[in-house]
Image (cartoon, coloured by chain):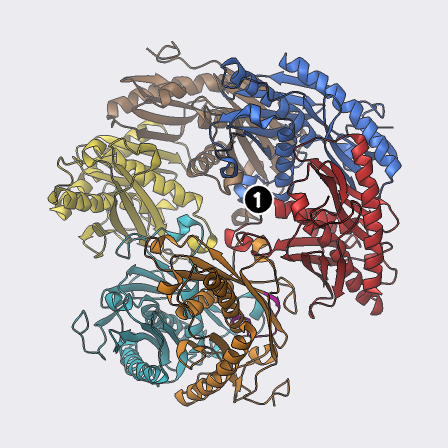
Chain colours: A red, B orange, C cyan, D blue, E yellow, F brown
Amino acid sequence: MRPSGRDLNQMRAVSIETGFTKHAEGSCLIKMGDTHVLCTATIEDRVPPFIKGSGLGWVTAEYGMLPRATNTRMRREAAMGKQGGRTVEIQRLIGRALRAGVDRVALGERQISIDCDVLQADGGTRCASITGGWVALRLAVNKLMKTGEVKIDPLVDPVAAVSCGIYAGQPVLDLDYPEDSEAGVDGNFIMTGSGQLIEVQMSAEGSMFSREQMDTLMDLATKGTAELAELQKAACA
Amino acid sequence: MRPSGRDLNQMRAVSIETGFTKHAEGSCLIKMGDTHVLCTATIEDRVPPFIKGSGLGWVTAEYGMLPRATNTRMRREAAMGKQGGRTVEIQRLIGRALRAGVDRVALGERQISIDCDVLQADGGTRCASITGGWVALRLAVNKLMKTGEVKIDPLVDPVAAVSCGIYAGQPVLDLDYPEDSEAGVDGNFIMTGSGQLIEVQMSAEGSMFSREQMDTLMDLATKGTAELAELQKAACA
Amino acid sequence: MRPSGRDLNQMRAVSIETGFTKHAEGSCLIKMGDTHVLCTATIEDRVPPFIKGSGLGWVTAEYGMLPRATNTRMRREAAMGKQGGRTVEIQRLIGRALRAGVDRVALGERQISIDCDVLQADGGTRCASITGGWVALRLAVNKLMKTGEVKIDPLVDPVAAVSCGIYAGQPVLDLDYPEDSEAGVDGNFIMTGSGQLIEVQMSAEGSMFSREQMDTLMDLATKGTAELAELQKAACA
Amino acid sequence: MRPSGRDLNQMRAVSIETGFTKHAEGSCLIKMGDTHVLCTATIEDRVPPFIKGSGLGWVTAEYGMLPRATNTRMRREAAMGKQGGRTVEIQRLIGRALRAGVDRVALGERQISIDCDVLQADGGTRCASITGGWVALRLAVNKLMKTGEVKIDPLVDPVAAVSCGIYAGQPVLDLDYPEDSEAGVDGNFIMTGSGQLIEVQMSAEGSMFSREQMDTLMDLATKGTAELAELQKAACA
Amino acid sequence: MRPSGRDLNQMRAVSIETGFTKHAEGSCLIKMGDTHVLCTATIEDRVPPFIKGSGLGWVTAEYGMLPRATNTRMRREAAMGKQGGRTVEIQRLIGRALRAGVDRVALGERQISIDCDVLQADGGTRCASITGGWVALRLAVNKLMKTGEVKIDPLVDPVAAVSCGIYAGQPVLDLDYPEDSEAGVDGNFIMTGSGQLIEVQMSAEGSMFSREQMDTLMDLATKGTAELAELQKAACA
Amino acid sequence: MRPSGRDLNQMRAVSIETGFTKHAEGSCLIKMGDTHVLCTATIEDRVPPFIKGSGLGWVTAEYGMLPRATNTRMRREAAMGKQGGRTVEIQRLIGRALRAGVDRVALGERQISIDCDVLQADGGTRCASITGGWVALRLAVNKLMKTGEVKIDPLVDPVAAVSCGIYAGQPVLDLDYPEDSEAGVDGNFIMTGSGQLIEVQMSAEGSMFSREQMDTLMDLATKGTAELAELQKAACA
C-alpha cells in the first residue's frame, strides 16, 4: 500500500505549463504531484573554453532549491557561500542527461544553460528537473530554428527521467517524499522517448538488491519515461 | 508619457495569491505587473544570539533572484560563492522594514524568516518583496494565534512599499524596469496602512533633486502604499 | 538633554587634516568628535568593464573598520573571509554619493578609488567617510588639473553628509554613538554645499515617524551639511 | 583490441599493500595497473549530529588527487579554495558504498573516516578507492574487535567496485585511462563478494545504450568484483 | 651610500605615540621613518580551545595594511575574501614573537589580541608591528596589574625587532623600502632588551650569504634592538 | 638522550626513491626516518605575470599533508575551503629556497612547479620537502637539457635543508616529532652543498636562546646539509 494510494506502477499527476516566465528563451513549470520545478533555458553565444572553435554546441545546467521548498527550511546556498554536495551532484546529472540527447554538431557553437529551481519539493526533484529541463530546451531550440540560426533539429527524441525504488519490499514507480525517505533501494532512470538508456543510477539505501529486482525497476522506469515523453511532446506542440 | 501608458500616479496591476507553496507557515506569490516574487514565512524557535533570553521576537529576511528572472541571465549567487552587494543591501532592507511593523514583545521569543525569491523581474522587486513578505508574515502569525502560541496580535497595521522616481522630468508612481533604468531620481518608500513612515530612501541617479521634488514623491508614495495596504488586507482576509 | 551636552542643532567639533599619508594622490584624516576616518584617493587608468570606451570616468569606494575601532573588538573582515552586510551597504552608499557630485565627462575615462578606513568609531562613520572622502577626491582631482590631464573641473560643489535622528523624542543633529544606539529614528542626509539633495535615508528604529518629523530632520541636515561644506572648502584651499 | 592488449573481460594487475602508513588505524596502497590510491581509515568517537544518541555508527569518506597524479598538472583544490564537483560526487559515492556494507548497529556509535588519496591516476580511481577503502576499513574494524570495543563483526562481506564500459563498440572490463577517455558508455558497479548489488551507475558518453548492453556490462562487473573480493580477503588475512 | 644618507649602522627616526585610540586597552602609533603602524591590544576572557582550563594565557596577533598604505594601491583583503600568504606569515610571526616574551602563567587564563594595521608603509612593517605591538601589550598588562587581575608582571623585558640586510654589498641596519626592494640578503631579528634571541630569519634574495655576513648582521641587529628597547621603555613610562 | 637513541649530531636514515610517479617530469619519494614526502616537478610554459617577457624562469612550490599523515587526523584543507597559515608559510619557504638555487636566466622563461605532499609525518616535513623537491627539480631540468630546451645548467649546487634545535637543553641535529614537540628552540637551515647559506630561521619555543647556542646549531646544520647534498647527488646520478 503506497501512502498516496497509487498503484505500484502508477505515476503521480504530471502537468507542464510552458512560458511560465517571459524573459527566458524557453521555460516551463513542471509539476509531478507536489514537486514543482521552474525550468528555464538561456541561449548564449559563448561556449566553455575546452570546445571553443570546435563548432560543437554545449548544454549545461544549474539546480537550486528555494529555502522553504521543503518541510523544514534549509539554509540558502548563496548565503552559505557554496553549493552543497547534493546540489553539485544533481546539476551535473541534469547537464549530462540533457547533453546526451542533443546532436551537438547540429546545435552549432553555442551554449544553452538550463536552470532548474525547485519551488516546492515532494521527492523526485532531479527527475522533474530533467523532464522539465528538456521542455525548456526544446522551446529554446524551436526559437533558434524559427530564426534559421539552427537548420537541422538537434533534438530527435525527448529525454525524460523517473525514479523507482523498493518501498516496503515492493518495487514502485515515481517515489514521492514519504516513499523516498523510507525506500530500501532508490534509482533514477533517464531514457529517451523511444526507450534508449542515457543514465541509470541505483543505490542501496539500507538494503542491497539483486539483479532480479534491478530488472523489475528497469521495467517500471521504461513505462514511466514513455508516459513522460508523451506529455513532453504534447506540452511543446 | 510612461512607456506602459499608465497615468503618472497609477500603480501597475497587483495580485496576491496566498498559499502558493504548501510547506511554509505562510506564503504568497505577489505580482506587481511583470514583477513576480514568491514570499514564504518560516517560524523557528531559535532567535539570534544577541536577544536570547530577552523574551523578544525577531523577523529576518533573505532575498534572491532566479538566474533568468531578468532579461539577460545573471550568474547564480550560490555558484559564485557569495551574495552580491545589491542582494545583501536589499535583504537587510526587507528585514528592517518588516521588523519595524512588529510588536516584538507580543511575538515572543521566536524568529520568523521571510524568504523573497524573484521568479520574474520588471522593476521594483524590493518593494514587491516587502509588500508580499508582510502577507506571508501575517499568515504565519495567524497560525501562531490560532494555536494560542501568541495571544496578542503583534501586527497592527500592514507594511507596504512602493518605488517612486523622476522619469523624463516627471514624478511617477511605481516604476517598472524601462522607467527605473532611465530615472534621474529613484526612491523607495515603506509605510504602514495608516500612513506612518518606516523607511525612506531617495537617491540621485544622474541628476540631483530638490526638496520640492522630494515632497511630490512622498505624496505619490502615500497614495501607492495606501492602495497596497488594502490589497494586503483583502488577501489575508 | 544630549549626553554630550550639545544643543539639538549643534554638530560635534570637526577637523580635517589633509595629506595624512604620503603615497595617495589625495588623503585626509577627518575627525567628527571621536569618530576618526582616514580617507585616501587613488587615481587609476582603468575603468570598470561596463563603461570601457565610453569616455566617462568612475568613482568607487571601499570602507573598512579596524578591529578595535569600536568599544569591543570586532572580527577582522579579511580574516573572516568576507565583508559583512553593513560594510557592503556603506561602501556602496559612499561610492554612489561621491559619484553623484562628479561630472563624469569632465573627469575623463579614469577611475578614482576612495578608501575610507575607520581608525576610531563613535557614531556617524558613514557620513564622516563621505565628507572626508570628498576632500581626498578633491585633492586628487587638483593633481589631475595641475598636470593638465583634466581640463574642466569635474567637481563643482562639495558633497557632505550628516546624520540626524529622533533621540529621546527630540530631533537632533549629528548623532554620536550613545545617541545613535538609542535613537528611535535614524537618518543619513547627503547634500551639496548649495543645498541640492543627493541621497536621503531615514529609518524607523523602534518607533515610526511622521512626515512632520521628517521635515524637521531635513532642516537640521541642511544646516549641518552647509557647515561641513565650508570646512571642506577651507581644508582644500 | 584494447590499448593494453588485455582480453575484453580481463582486469588489470591488482596489488594491495596493507600498513602503508603507520599512524592510521587501517591503511593500504592499492594499485590497479597504473592507478595508485592510498587509503586510510581513522576511528573517531564522534558521529554526525543527526545520529547522535542513536547508538548507530557512521562511515564517511573523503577523496583527493595529488596535483600531478595526472598527465597534466591539475590545480590543487586546497589552493583553489574548494573541492570540485567531480571530487564531491566521488567522495559521496565512496562513503555511500562503504556504509552500505556495514552493520551500523554492530559498529556502535562511532565514526570511521576513510581518506582516499590518488597518488597516480590511470582511470578507475573511484573504483580503486572503494575497493582499497574497504580494506582500510576492515583493518580498522579488526583493531576495534581485538580490543573488544566492538563485539559483533559489522563487516560481513567485502565491498568492491569496478568500472565497465563500451569501448570501440565492445563491452570491456576495468577501463584504463586511454579506454575511459574514448568510451561511449561508462559504468561503475559496486557489489559485495557474494554478488549483491550496492550501487550501479551507467552513463551514456556520446552514444546511448540498450538494455542488452547493460546486461552484458553487469555480467563483466560481476566477474570483476568477485575477483577483487578475493584479493581483499587475502590482503586482510 | 644609503639612499637616505644614513650611516650603515644608523636606524631611522623612531617615535611611539601611546594612547592613539581611545577604546583599546593599550594602543600606540609607531613611526619608524615613513613606516607608520597603529597597534592596539584587546584583553579577552576567552582563550583558544587547546589551552582551555590550563591556567595559561595567550597572546595572538593580526596584521593588515590599508589598501593605499603603499605606493600603488593594493587590493583590500576583506574584499578579496582572504588574507594573502604574506599577511598570514607576518601575523603568525608577530604573535609568536610577542608570546615568547610573556610569562603565560603570570598572565593567567586570558587572551590579549594585538592588531597591527599599517597606515603608511616604507619597509620594515613587520618589525615596527612587533616593536609597537609590545608597547600596546605592555599598556594593556599595566591595566590588568592596576586592577589586581594580574599580580606578577608577565612581561620582564621588552621585545623589539629590526631588519638588517646586505644592500649594495654592504651590511646595513633598518632597511627602508628603497633598500629592501634591492637588498641581496634580508633578515628580521627579534630580541629582548637584554639581548636574548627570540627569532632570527635570514633569507637570500638573489645572492646567497656566508656565515661571516650573518655574524655582521647579527651585530647590527643587536645594536638596533637595544636602541628600540630603550624607546619602548620610555614610551610606557 | 634522544628518544630515538641517536647521537646529538646524527641524522635519521634518509632514502630517496626517484621516479615514484610516472606522469611528472621529475619525482621522488624522500624518507627522512618516518617522515615520507612525495615530491613532483611539473614543467609549464607559462610564467607569473610579473616576469612575463623578461626571459627569466620561475620556480614555485605547493605543500600539502594527507589528512591522516599525522597521529590524529587533521581536516582536509580542500574540504575546509582554504589552506591553513602553516601550509602557506611552508610552501612559500620551499619556493623561495629552491628559487635561490636556480640560475633563472639559464632556466629561460618557463615555470617549474614543485608539489610536496606529505604521506606520513614525523617531524621535519618542510626540510624533507625542500631536499626532495630539489631532487624532483634536478630530474625535470635534466629532461630540459636532454632535449636541448635548456643549454646551460641552471642548477649548480644542491639545495638541502635540515632542522636543528635545543632538545632537553642539548643542541641536536634533525629533530623528529617527539623532539620537535618538546624543543625549546627550533630552527630550519637551508644551505647549498658547498656550504653557502640560503635561509636561516630560528625560533624560541618556550625558552630564548643565546648567540652561542645559535652558533652551535649552525655547526650541526652545516654537517647535516652536507650529508644530504651527497645523497641528493647520488639519487640523481
Quadrant where the image shows the C terminus of chain F: top right
Q: What residue sits right under mark 1 in the picture?
A: F47
Quadrant of res A138: bottom right
Q: Nearer the viewer, residue C161 or A89?
A: A89
Q: Residue at x 42, y 62 (%)?
A: B150
Q: Nearer the viewer, residue A225 or F20?
A: A225
Question: How crowded is the residue under tag 1: few (<14 C-alpha within 10 Å), some, or many (20+)?
Answer: many
- The kind of residue on which mark 1 rests is Val
- At 33% from the left and 46% from the top, the residue drawn is E62
Q: Which residues are magenta?
A: B118-126
Can residue F32 be spotted in the picture? yes
Q: Chain of mark 1?
A: F
Compared to residue D157, the image places residue E101 above or below, namely: below
Observer-nearest residue: E27 or C106? E27
Residue C42 location (% of width, % of height): 41, 64
Which residue is more in the foreground, F12 or B198? B198
Q: Quadrant of the N terminus of chain F?
A: top left
Residue F7 vertical position relative to residue E160 in the rendered view, above or below? above
The structure residue drawn at horizontal position 31% and vertical position 44%, both measured from the top left corner, is E175
Residue E20 point in image, percent of width and height: 21, 56
Residue A192 appears in the picture as rendered = no
Horizontal placement of E106 versus E178: left or right? left
Is F181 situated left or right of A48 in this image?
left
Q: Is residue E213 magenta?
A: no
Q: Position of residue C49 (x, y in %)?
A: 57, 65
- Residue D153 picture location, percent across and down: 59, 18
